[in-house]
Image (cartoon, rainbow, N blue to C red):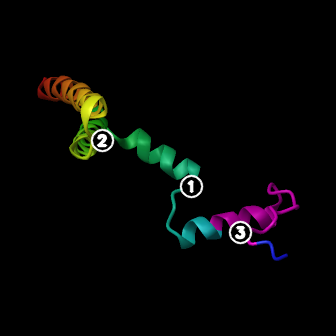
Amino acid sequence: MFKITPNPPTEDLSSLASQIAIERAFAHYELPQDNVSRRRREQLTTEDVLTQIDEILQSASATAYECADNLLGSNRKLALGVVHLVDLALSRMDNLLEK
């Protein structure tokens, strides 16, 4: 029988060759390495972070609302309750951003 998924590497990933391979893979796919992403997080202002949270909440509200459109009965009420909670959080976020 043919195994579709390969076995995990048996070598120690802390070796220099492994670290170089990991760095090349991150560079190839343009993924931030841990220290780079940490620097980017530190450069964000509080307002930037709050704006990102606001966008995430807007996406959550839209997703829950679309889900509610496809449900009936108590499941629909539950999904609309989630929409309401997210909208409350959005209004609190908007008030905070205005200050």
Q: Whole-percent x and y of residue 91?
A: 15, 26
For image coordinates 74% across by 72% down, the residue present is 4
Badge 3 local density, few (<14 within 10 Å), some, or many (20+)? few
Asked if marks 3 and 2 touch (Cβ < 8 Å), the reply is no
For image coordinates 83% across by 59% down, the residue present is 15
Which residue matches tag 1?
33
Q: Main secondary structure of the magenta part?
A: loop
Q: Quadrant of residue 23?
A: bottom right
Query: Which sits in the foreground, 53 or 85?
Result: 85
Identity of the amino acid at label 3? Answer: Ala
Dividing the image into 4 quarters, which one contains the N terminus?
bottom right
Q: Whole-percent x and y of residue 45?
A: 30, 36
Q: Secondary structure at mark 2?
A: helix
Say how many tags the image has.
3
Q: Is residue 22 above or below residue 59?
A: below
Q: In this orientation, does residue 86 appear?
A: yes
Identity of the amino acid at label 2? Answer: Ile
